[in-house]
Image: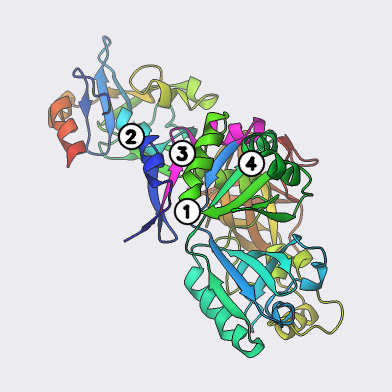
Amino acid sequence: MARRTPHFDTHVAAGAKMVEFGGWEMPISYGSQLEEHHQVRSAAGIFDISHMTIVDLSGDRVREFLSRLLANDVEKLQQPGKALYSCMLNERGGVVDDLITYFVDQRLFRMVVNAATREKDLEWIRRHAGAFGVVVHEHLELAMIAVQGPTAREAVLGVLPPEAAEQAAALPRFFAVQLGDLFVARTGYTGEDGFEICLPDAAAQSLWDRLVAAGVRPCGLGARDTLRLEAGMNLYGQDMDEDVSPFESALGWTVAMDGERQFIGRAALERQRAAGVPRKLVGLVLEARGVLRTGQRVVTAAGDGAVTSGSFSPTLQRAIGLARVPAEAAGECQVEIRGKLLTARFVRPPFVRNGRACEGIL
Amino acid sequence: MSNIPAELKYTHSHEWVSVEVDGSMRVGISDHAQEALGDLVFIELPAEGDQLEQGDACAVVESVKAASDIYSPITGVVVAVNEDLADDPGIVNSDPYGDGWLFAVNPSDESELDGLLDAEAYGETLEE
């Protein structure tokens, strides 16, 4: 039986279409997915992301452990509150999951991992944590809300007590702070400014209601997906998985290979780099009318590839996608849609930032 | 509860058919179908002159989420397609039985209409 977030009844009462996702009953949309998407690009939307898995890692050697576990370098986290996006790799250099790690204090780091990969992630983390004496604690009692859009911060600050609002207002991008019950992070998955907030289940509905009363509109996972795609952000399980490396997933920038740090998967990545990375993940803009979808064949002069994420971009009003293609592919390509080969163009994501098309996309 | 006009005929796959004054038959998708699909963003229609068999996959409607085939409820030749949908597929969401029609067919066997569902029978399929 799928789990329900503290906002389940609110979603149903608001007329949300509910779907099972990662073992949870989640709202895909409250009516019009397109309107929800535009709301986030133009004002502010609120997302129930309580399905995300929140894990605290603690112990004297937690930093050393993360230095082994993560492909990105935890030493980049020197200021309390700072966040780091990283992959966890297997020994073959494949991506076990992508996640955000927050530096709370020298003995405590918080990690937010995907819902769909919860069990294997926890198993993987625990398997390696033991040797470092690190305690892995999953916060089952915490909900999570994302408030995103150009007016999102203002809306959140408006419903927080004055002292908390002051501290949240001072938060730089990609930093988090604990404010009483609320763990407030200036992070997101939409390409807009805003906050992601972890808070006790019991307190979650009240914050949700205050934000909605302040004009922030509930948005479902459908809009979340088109927003993240426009923002050029990968979705685990679609754009990367255990059989591809970060180099083949446009995530080379998250791998810190300077120095001698022996993180899990490093040897495999070095072998792949020496042999030549065979494939790359690129952005696609469809020049013809139609919609890009996951799995469509991409025909290039250097060989075939496939669309990993595709949709209609509500902001750009045309089909966009991410595709894994041979490393030498460049310029134009064709995508097979219902037996027809349609022209598409390789671009460098993101497609949209702060509500507008990025350079070179249109 | 979705809107099911009494004067139309329906298919199990959620198309509707109306008989026009000139004897042609217009085809669209039901209110239930547009609601289930969500916001439509692209529609591929048959070409005028195409010969369709009953049950042919002859058009595609794509929402943000997914693509769905449209099956011709009747056999005949396509005599008109709704050109307005190319620029604004959302018309199908806002007016599925009116301005959101998809295409019209000159039927080769009008008795096929008798084999389709009436509003009541179609409504029952939605409750199952």
| C-alpha gap between disc 1 and disc 3 | 37 Å
Which element is circle 2 on? Answer: helix
Q: Which residues are magenta?
A: A25-44
Which element is circle 1 on? Answer: helix
Mark 4 neighbour density, 10 Å: few (under 14) some (14–19) many (20 or more): many
Residue A75 position, x and y percent, is 81, 72
Whether tag 3 and tag 4 are in contact, CB under 8 A, the answer is: no
Q: Quadrant of residue A280?
A: bottom right
Q: Is residue A291 visible?
A: no
Identify the subunit bearing mark 2: B
**Left-right relation of B91 to A69:** left
Residue at the location (17% across, 42% down)? B128
Residue type indicated by callout 4: Gln
Work out whether mark 3 precedes mark 2 in sequence or the reverse, and give the earlier one. Answer: 2
User: Residue under circle 3?
Assistant: B62
- Please tell me the numbered disc located at residue B33: 2
Which element is circle 4 on? Answer: strand
| C-alpha gap between disc 1 and disc 2 | 36 Å
- Please tell me the numbered disc located at residue A148: 4
Q: Nearer the viewer, residue B71 or A321?
A: A321
- Comparing labels 1 and 3, the label whose residue is closer to the camera: 1
- Please tell me the numbered disc located at residue A201: 1
Please say if A273 is above or below A149.
Answer: below
Which element is circle 3 on? Answer: strand
Q: Nearer the viewer, residue A258 or B39?
A: A258
| C-alpha gap between disc 2 and disc 4 | 31 Å
